[in-house]
Amino acid sequence: MQSKKWRTSMPNATDRQSGLPNHKSGWLSLCLCVITMTIVWLLLLPALSHIPSLQAEIENQKARGIDASAMFYTDLDMMDEVLERLENARRKNPTALWLPSNQAELD
Amino acid sequence: MNDSSNDETKSEIPAAAQRQSTWQEMCSSEDWWAVWIGGVILLVSFLAVYLTIPGDVSEQLANGEKVKLSSPLKPWIAKPGSWLRNPVKAFYVAGEKNVLPGLFGVFVLALGFFGFGLTVMGHSAAKFAVGFCGVFLLATLAYVLAGQEVVKYYSLSYALWAIVVGMIISNTIGTPEFMKPAVRTEFYIKTGLVLLGAGVLFSRLLVLGVPGIFVAWVVTPIVLISTYIFGQKVLKIESKSLNMVISADMSVCGVSAAIATAAACKAKKEELSFAIGLSLTFTVVMMVVLPAIIKAFGMSEVLGGAWLGGTIDATGAVAAAGGILGDKALEVATTVKMIQNILIGVTAFGVAIYWVTKVEQNDSGIKPDAMEIWYRFPKFVIGFVAASVVFSVLYSMLPGGESMVNAMVKDSTKTLRGWFFCLAFVSIGLEINFREFSKYFKGGKPLMLYVAGQSLNLVLTLFMAWLMFEVIFKDAIEKMAN
C-alpha cells in the first residue's frame, strides 16, 4: 500500500535534473568503477591474503567455524557447539546462572 | 522532525473515508503480502523437514534425543560461497561444491513468490520478471564481492556491497528502466524479516541465565533509549527515524537491527544505508581495537567476551573479535550477542508501537484511537513476531522440535532471508544518488550520536559484565568454563 511505504527523498535516481552525469560520461564512470573493483578484488585482495599473519587468521577463523560477516547468530556454524556445551553445563547445575547463593552449593 | 518531513507524514496518512478495510488490505498491501509469502515459505520449509524424517530417527526424536536433521530443500537453496583468488570458486569447485542449482532454485522461488504477490497487487508480472533478472544478477555480484576471504575477514557483509553495486549503477548510467519494476526494497525486506522471525527463539534468551539477561537485555534497552533521547534533546537531529535506526543498530546488533527498526519506523532508504555504513565502519575498528584493549588491561576471557558481545554491532565481528582472545571469550561473546539478537523482535515491535502512537501522532497533530493505531501499524511486524512465537513454541514443545527448527533455519530459511535482504539492499542502492546521500555526512550529528551512544554502551556493558561475570556469578561461571 502506497501510504505505508518508506519515504524516499528523491523521486527518480536517473532524473537528469538531479545533476547526474550525462549518458556518455555515465558509461565512462561505470567502466572506471568496474575496472577499479576488478583490480581490487582480483589483484589487491588476493595479494593481501598472502600476508602470513592475515592468512593464518583467515585459516583460524575457518577452522573454528567463525564467519566474520555473519549478520545473525543463525549464520554462525559454531553456535551449535557453543549452545550444546551450555546446555550440558546447565543440565549439570540447572540453577548455577540463576541464583547467586548457589555458589556455595557448587563448592 | 522538520517541517517538510512533518508535511510528508501528514500526506502519507489518508483520511479515514479513503481507507481500505483490513480485509482489503490483507489482499492488496505489501505488508500483508510479505506476511503471506514469509508464512508460506516457513510452513513449506518446516513441513519439508517434518515429513521427511526417517522412521528410526522419529523414535529417537520422540525419546527427546538430539538428532542432526537436514532439509530436502537444501540442494535447491544456496548462495555464492567464499573464495580467495578465483571468483569462479564462489560457484563451483570440482568435487566439492556446485551452488548453481541452488541459485537457480532461489531465483525461481523468489521470482514466483514476489511476482505472484505483485500481480495480485495490480503490477505487471512480466515487467517484474524482466527487471528481477537484473536485480538478481546484481545481488549475486554483491554476494561474490562479499565472499572474498579478506573482505569476509573484516566483517564487510553483503549488505554493504549490495548497496555499493546498486549505487554505482544508479549514479553512473542511471537505473535501467527495465529494472525499475523489480526495485521493491520494502517488499523484499519485510518478507526477509518474517523469515528472520523464525530464528528469534525465546528459549535461547535464557541460555546464559541472569548474567546474559542483564548484559544483553538490561543494558541494551537503556543504551537504545538514552541514545535516542540524546539525539532528540541534545543533538536535535532533524530526522527521528535516522536517530532511531542509528540508536538501534549501535545498541542492539548492527545491520539486522537496523533493517528491522528502519522498517518499523518507516525510515528513508538513505537513512538505513547511512546507518549501515556507519555501523560497519565502527564494527571493523572495534573488532580490532577492543581485543587489544582487553589484552592490554589483562581482563579475563569471560569478562572480555561479554564486553565484546554486548558492544560490537555485527554478530560475525563479535565472533571474530572473541576468537582473537580465546575459546572462552569466543563462547561468551557469541552467546551474549545471540541473546541480543533475540531482542530484535521486541525492539521492532516496540519501535512500531512508539512510532504509530507517539511520533506520527505528534507529527499529524491527531491523537490516534485504537483503530487508527491498527491502521498505521506496520503489519509485517505481526508476521515477524508471529513467526518468532510459533517457532519458539515448536522448538521447545514439539518432540524433536529443536532439531527440526534448526534444520529448517540452517538449510533453507536462513539462506532465503539473506537473499531477500540482499535484493533489498541492491534496490536501495538503485534508488539512491550520491548527492542525497552525502547530506547525512554534513554537520556530523549522526556520527556524534553513534560515538556518544557507543561510549555509553562500552561503559555500561563493561560495568554490568564485570558485576555479573566477575562478582555475583564468578564461581558459577568459573565452574562452567572449566
Image: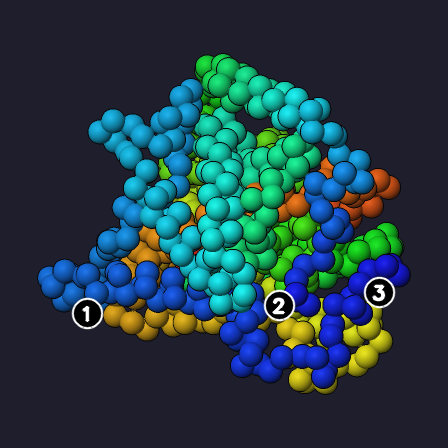
Neighbour tally class for label 2: few under 14, some 14-19, many 20 plus, Cα within 10 Å: few
Q: Determine the residue positioned at 49% across, 63% down.
A: B119
The answer for how far apart the CA atoms under marks 3 and 1 are is 59 Å
Q: Secondary structure at mark 1?
A: helix
Q: Nearer the viewer, residue B401 or B88?
A: B88
* SS at badge 2: loop
The CA distance from mark 2 to mark 1 is: 45 Å
Check disc 2 and report the residue beneath it.
A1
Which disc number belongs to residue B62?
1
Quarter residue B65 falls in: bottom left
Residue B359, percent from left and from top: 77, 69
Q: Position of residue B236 (x, y in %)?
A: 87, 55
Could you confirm whether marks 2 and 1 are on the same chain?
A: no
Count every numbered label the image shows and give the total: 3
**Residue B187: quadrant of the picture:** bottom right
Please give the residue where the numbered disc 3 appears in the rendered image. Answer: B7
| Picture disc at residue A63 | none
Task: Kindly check if marks 2 and 1 are in contact, taking CB atoms under 8 A apart as contact.
Answer: no
Q: CA distance from mark 3 to mark 2?
A: 19 Å
Residue at 60% over, 43% down:
B177
Camera-side mark, 2 or 1:
2
Colouring of the image: rainbow
Quadrant housing the N terminus of chain B: bottom right
Q: Chain of mark 3?
A: B
Q: Secondary structure at mark 3?
A: helix
Residue A94 seen in this snapshot: no
First in residue order: circle 3 vs circle 1: 3
Above or below residue B155? Residue B307 is: below
